[in-house]
Image (spheres, helix red, strand yellow):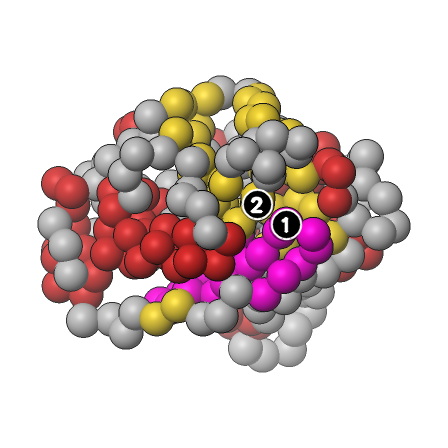
Amino acid sequence: MREFSIGEWQQVRDGIWVVQCQPASVNVGLVVGQEGVLMVDTGSSPAQGRELARRAQELVGRPVTHVVVTHAHFDHFYGLAGIEDVVSIGHENLLQHLDGTNDPDVDPEVIRRDLGFDPSELVGPSDPMVLIRAVDLGGRTVEIVHLGNGHSDSDLFVLVADQKVVFTGDMVETSGDPFVGPDSQVETWPKAIDGVTSNARPETLFVPGHGPVVGIDEVTQQRAAVSMLWSTAEDCIKKGMTIDDVVADLNGPREVDWPFAPQSVANALPHLYRALEAKGVTKSRNLPLLGL
């Protein structure tokens, strides 16, 4: 059984808090208005979600009224099943992932063994969305937007405009390199990040899915790194490098420059190559007149 714990709430700005939960060191957010209380993400199990809602009510003196799930992975999604009597919002693709098999980190047997519940307990959002949703919490409106797929097929950003705070889910991670898995779409990931940074101000704060709260500079740097990850993998395919060739280079002469740590790149390579090859990217043909 994995170790579950919930840290202490840390205030980000007026009426906005974040708490780190284990396993997976996931950030869970809380946004409070005059009437409503919105939680961003739910933890890793129904029991943890239930406890998060209880602690949120203890913190602000009112129950959680709304929940947003930023994407379908277990540490953000599975706690939803333990939070009752709320309006829950998530991308409509969450409804396709109630068996747990979408998640690159867990499978149904792992859910039973390590997370301590049966996948049949999972529930989807009561208010599934596609592109945009606004929630009036009383004196504070929270905007929830899907700007394209990146880390997963169900990524949402949560914007609190009056306090200039953006919850990014795992579209941004500051505890380490962003994770690329089987449901990631790296090609469109940077453009989705552009959608929230284009209107950001120097004082805007970004709460990542994992890691410390950061400013716009760190987010734009990670956006550039994700873009480089895609273009570098494309160059490797065009040069005729197999995944094994790239891994050997990561552990050897390092002739190819990558934006992330070797293990992060190695984990991402099968997914990058599969996506690029599906787009028709192949080894570049030699130029016969030059003999190259």
Mark 1, other Cα within 10 Å: few <14 / some 14–19 / many ≥20: some
Tell me if I can see residue 161 in this picture.
Answer: yes
Q: Position of residue 125 (x, y in %)?
A: 34, 30
Q: Residue at x 29, y 52 (%)?
A: 50
Please tell me whether the stretch drawn in magenta is mainly helix, strand or loop: strand
Quadrant housing the N terminus: bottom left
Q: Position of residue 15 (x, y in %)?
A: 63, 50
| Front residue (pair 77, 37) | 37
Tell me if I can see residue 145 in this picture.
Answer: no
| Residue for badge 2 | 31
| Residue for badge 1 | 15
Residue placed furthest toward the bottom: 252
Q: Position of residue 177 (x, y in %)?
A: 58, 63
Q: Is residue 205 left or right of residue 185?
A: right
Q: Position of residue 247 (x, y in %)?
A: 50, 67
Q: Residue at x 30, y 34 (%)?
A: 85
Disc 2 is placed on an element classified as: strand
Q: Is residue 149 left or right of residue 202?
A: left
Mark 2, other Cα within 10 Å: few <14 / some 14–19 / many ≥20: many
Above/below status of 239 relative to 84: below
| Badge 2 amino acid | Val
| Front residue (pair 29, 74) | 29
Contact, CB < 8 Å: mark 1 with mark 2?
A: yes
| Front residue (pair 74, 51) | 51
Above/below status of 45 relative to 183: below
Residue placed furthest toward the right: 202
Q: Which residues are magenta?
A: 10-29
Please say whether residue 15 is one of the residues in the magenta stretch: yes
Distance from disc 1 to disc 2, alpha carbons, whole Å, reads: 6 Å
